[in-house]
């Protein structure tokens, strides 16, 4: 019996590439989807690069809030470039294959940037908490050293989390099937295709994601509970509106990002249609990077003023 099992293991063909099915069940919409995602990619890249340029060039934007915004825009530029160019090429040429090493690279970059975004959004909410709840001490507390430490900590935390995950992922072998029913290399669809024992990596993944998402999310929620409580205590309506306007853009971004992220990863997998899962994945992988520069530029007077100076 053991000899038969060993022979079966030896006869397994280790696959070297995956097939990303993407939106292949809609062949008549491939060109339309290509054009839509191409426009989204161009607008996302242009908007985020413009915000980075404005934050660097305009002296009035050299504040903690815009320092974090510049970091977020830099992250979103990398984030959207991890997924969209590969998807656009697939939609245009019809070639859905991706090498196993390419899939691992995409998974690593996506995981690293998504984890970093969670920490960076928490750092931005803490900045808004200090600005609104402790305005007299804000300049002393949120100094340049703390800003750098929070930003550096966000990037390093995301990097280390994904290094640990990829060390375990690299031990897996894939023997087929080779089809991933998604438009990018996500963790769960890849894990399902492995013919190795995945119990250890599943446990490690659970521990790391329990630290990566809930902890920054709880810090963000706690910050906003304190912020809203402080705003409600402001006697004048004008004062409340002014205080809320300083954090409303960030609150919208947090809601869109975490709302779509939780919908994808917390909904029961057995009852959720794969197509619906893909739609919500588009929200946090494609639309969130697009929404960020639009929200911050349309709702923020200082950014609009800096843009007006550049144009004039």
Image (cartoon, helix red, strand yellow):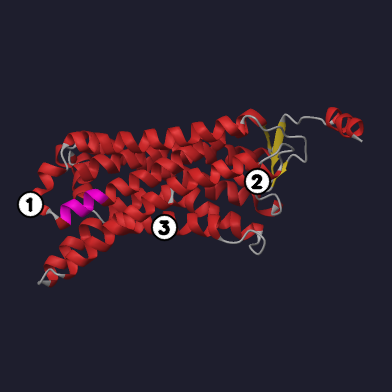
Q: Position of residue 288 (x, y in %)?
A: 43, 51
Disc 1 vs disc 2: Cβ atoms closer than 8 Å? no
Q: Residues within 10 Å of mark 1 (few under 14, many from 20)?
A: few
The answer to which image quadrant residue 74 occupies is: top left
Q: Which mark is residue 136?
A: 1
- Residue to which mark 2 is pinned: 189
Give the mark nearest the N terminus, 1 or 2: 1
Q: Position of residue 241 (x, y in %)?
A: 18, 66
Q: Residue at x 29, y 46 (%)?
A: 123
> Left of 18 or right of it: where is 43?
left
Of circles 1 and 3, which is in front? 1
Q: Position of residue 117 (x, y in %)?
A: 39, 44
Query: Visible in this render: residue 238?
Result: yes
Of circles 2 and 3, which is in front? 2
Query: Visible in this render: residue 184?
Result: no
Query: Is 159 rendered above or below residue 304?
Result: above
Q: Which residues are magenta?
A: 126-132
- Residue to which mark 3 is pinned: 256
Q: Position of residue 204 (x, y in %)?
A: 55, 41
Query: Is 267 rendered above or below residue 308?
Result: below
Q: Nearer the viewer, residue 284 or 197?
A: 197
Helix, strand or loop for disc 1: helix
Where does the C terminus fall, quadrant-wise?
A: top left
The Cα atoms of the two marked residues, 1 and 3, are separated by: 31 Å
> Left of 113 or right of it: where is 68?
left
């Amino acid at each position: 019996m053991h000899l038969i099992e060993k022979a079966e293991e030896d006869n397994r063909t280790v696959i070297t590439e995956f097939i990303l099915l993407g939106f292949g069940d809609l062949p008549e919409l491939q060109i339309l989807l290509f054009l839509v995602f191409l426009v989204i990619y161009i607008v996302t890249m242009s908007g985020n690069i413009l915000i980075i340029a404005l934050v660097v060039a305009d002296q009035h934007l050299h504040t903690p809030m815009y320092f974090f915004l510049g970091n977020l825009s830099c992250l979103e530029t990398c984030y959207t470039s991890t997924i969209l160019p590969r998807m656009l090429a697939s939609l245009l040429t019809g070639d859905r294959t991706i090498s196993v090493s390419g899939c691992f690279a995409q998974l690593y970059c996506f995981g690293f940037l998504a984890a970093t975004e969670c920490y960076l959004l928490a750092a931005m909410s803490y900045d808004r908490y200090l600005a609104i709840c402790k305005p007299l001490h804000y300049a002393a507390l949120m100094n340049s050293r703390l800003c750098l430490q929070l930003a550096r900590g966000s990037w390093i935390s995301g990097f280390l989390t994904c290094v640990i995950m990829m060390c375990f992922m690299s031990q897996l072998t894939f023997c087929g099937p080779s089809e991933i029913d998604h438009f990018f290399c996500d963790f769960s669809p890849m894990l399902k295709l492995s013919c190795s024992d995945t119990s250890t990596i599943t446990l490690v993944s659970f521990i790391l994601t329990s630290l990566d998402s809930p902890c920054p999310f709880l810090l963000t929620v706690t910050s906003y509970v304190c912020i809203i409580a402080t705003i409600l205590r402001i006697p004048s309506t004008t004062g409340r509106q002014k205080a809320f306007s300083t954090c409303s853009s960030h609150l919208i971004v947090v809601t869109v990002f975490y709302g779509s992220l939780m919908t994808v990863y917390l909904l029961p997998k057995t009852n959720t249609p794969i197509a619906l899962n893909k739609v919500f994945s588009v929200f946090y992988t494609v639309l969130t990077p697009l929404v960020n520069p639009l929200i911050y530029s349309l709702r923020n007077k200082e950014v609009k003023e800096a843009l007006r100076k550049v144009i004039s």
